[in-house]
Amino acid sequence: MDMTTSDPLVGATLDRRYFVESRIAGGGMATVYVAHDLRLDRRLALKVMHASLAQDPTFVQRFINEAHSVAKLSHPNVVQVFDQGEDRGHVFLAMEYVPGLTLREHLRSRGRLPTREALQVMAPVLAALGAAHQAGMIHRDVKPENVLITEDGRVKVADFGLARAVEQSQQGLTRTGTLMGTAAYLAPEQIEQGVADARTDVYSAGIMLYELLTGTQPHTGETPIAIAYQHVNEDVPRPSQYLPRLSQDVDDLVTKGTERDPRYRPSNAGQYLAKLLEVLGRMPERSEPAAGPMPPVGRPGAPGSSITAPELIAGGAGPGTENATMVVDMGAAPPPGDYGDGYDEEADDGLRRRRNLLLGIGGAIVAIVVFVAGWWLFFGRFEQVPDVTGSTLNSAREQVRTEGLVLVEAEERVYSDGIEAGRVARTEPAAEERMLPGEEVTAYVSLGPRVVEMPDLEGEDIVDALAELEDLGFGEDAVEQVDQDAEGVTPGEVISTEPAPGEEADREEGVTVTISRGIEVPPLVGQEQEEAERTLRQLDLNIEVVEQDSEEVEKGLVISQSPDSGRTVGAAGTITITVSTGPPGIEVPDVVGMNVNEARRALEEAGFKVKVERIAGGRTVVHQSHEDQAPEDTEITITATPGGIELPGIGGGEDDD
């Protein structure tokens, strides 16, 4: 059955950008299509989640979060994620299109790989995983199906983050589609505890190396549960049980990566890659042992499918090689049944000595590359976060920028006993930590100390007392006012405070101010200005008027007041009311000198009404009633005279509209 013609998505366009050309693969979680990016005019792969997953909002959100993280991972051996989206129920990833074949397909055609070739394939896989581990990401589903080999011999790892999104959404390894696809490569701690870290990826890589060497998986069974049980309770056998002449180094490499206790594995793929490159560097050109008993798998020796001669493009062997890029040549395969068994143990001693000398030189070069790559990856490429504690935001931003980093202000502000309000209290990451150039440093601005000494406010007018507390960092909601009758105390004056003067006052817990019963401020918002002023005068309160443009509040109405209604003020206290002046003015076009029709058109297009006054049938405007700004729909009067001659008495200034 033709998948392309039967698939409804073929020929559709997702997100008005990605035209689906054909379907190329399907799996338990998603279907992969070749698509054309109409916006950037390029081919890419479109991975569309199955409907059962796309309908789970928890999965979709986690999938989106993972996609954002994966998109930040830029490495030549990682399939790049370009975009993520959702269209008509289809949740998709737009990814780099990698024409070629999967490592699973390559393995099926070969049966198994010669030792050197197996190590050469695993090196770029570990380089990709090491880069992810360096960035704090875990793959969780390392297997040959997720390793792609391009037409020009590059090895790329795909599907970072997808397994985690499904795992968290389904919450369990026994759900259909989770265990089935990964049981052969799951680490014991994933099965027993449901936890994953860089060492679980190392375990899966070790299983994959075993399979490349022997052509079969170490644990097999009729059900995924049976396979998982073996991972937890049985050690992975040494590949030398199937390949008796396999070198001890390679045997140990598989055993080290597949330790059941994660404490005894390499802590990340970068360390595992370093061990692998050390083994590869010590191998003679043809060192493949004779194949022992093993079940026939696939089609050994398929022409044109051999992977040979790795070239280390960047990075090196040893710690820090997780950003190494590996390229492999797709050369001719050995003849059927020939896995390179021709290494002659009785070769000429002189040839062996020369070979050992070359290996020694190669080892020294590898060691130098390891040192340089390790220094650059762990020290040289990083920038140190400067100590900007106590600096203003502008100063801190400049200091951080000088180090090649970017400063962003946190939405949350924090209390700090030693840093005054408005200055940087701390950063994340902290000072002297190392970051990649261009990464963000988050600055937390100080609110000042949380606990301050309570001032002596007794006898002060409540308005002045509130202002003093505000200066100390107490917000309006942190001050509780209590009215109390008191003989001999002027209304509105502070009688006492809690805490008392000189005691510690917590800005989070707030303070209580007891005042002599004064005048309660009435609600004024929404009233006409004249009415509000009349109310305040009746209470013997002073009035301050502030005018403000407003598109929502009608002209002449009170927009806000200070203090708010319900507050108490002393006798002769001042109340500030903000009054609307109506919508903000619009720039009035200068139409003097235009003919009447042009002037009318210009004013109407600007949002005004127009009134024309002609003198002696005049057609040229010599005067307009408004010249600067006026509210929308204001009527502008224009006066026209013959020949544009201004007559006496015209132009008495701007009308008051």
Image (cartoon, helix red, strand yellow):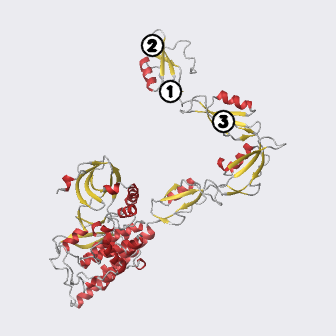
Q: Residue at x 75, y 51 (%)?
A: 497
Dot 2: element: helix
Q: Reading the chain from its start, which is encountered first: label 3 or label 2?
A: 3
Of the two numbered discs 1 and 2 in the rendering, the one whose residue sits closer to the viewer: 1
- Residue placed under numbered mark 2 in the picture: 643
* Image position of 56 (left or right of 482): left
423 shown above or below 245? above
Residue 536 position (above or below residue 194): above
Residue 160: x, y in percent? 35, 63
**Mark 1, residue position:** 632
Percent x, y for residue 62? 40, 58
- The kind of residue on which mark 1 rests is Glu
Q: How many marks?
A: 3
- Element at badge 3? loop
Assess disc 3: are there few (<14), some (14-19) or many (≥20) residues with their C-alpha within 10 Å of its C-alpha: some
Q: Nearer the viewer, mark 3 or mark 2?
A: 3
**Residue positioned most to the top:** 616
Badge 1 or badge 3: first in the primary sequence: 3
Q: Dots 3 and 2: beta carbons under 8 Å?
A: no
Instruction: Place residue 101 in its image quadrant.
Output: bottom left
**Image position of 559 (left or right of 3):** right
Q: x, y percentage for residue 252?
A: 33, 83
Residue corresponding to mark 3: 523
Q: Is residue 517 above or below residue 170?
A: above
Which amino acid type is shown beneath numbered disc 3?
Pro
Q: Looking at the image, tell me whether mark 1 or mark 2 is earlier in sequence order.
A: 1
Residue 470 position within the rendered picture, expressed as x and y whole percent measured from the top left: 68, 48
Q: Amino acid at mark 2?
A: Gly
Query: On the picture, is 290 further left or further right than 601?
Result: left
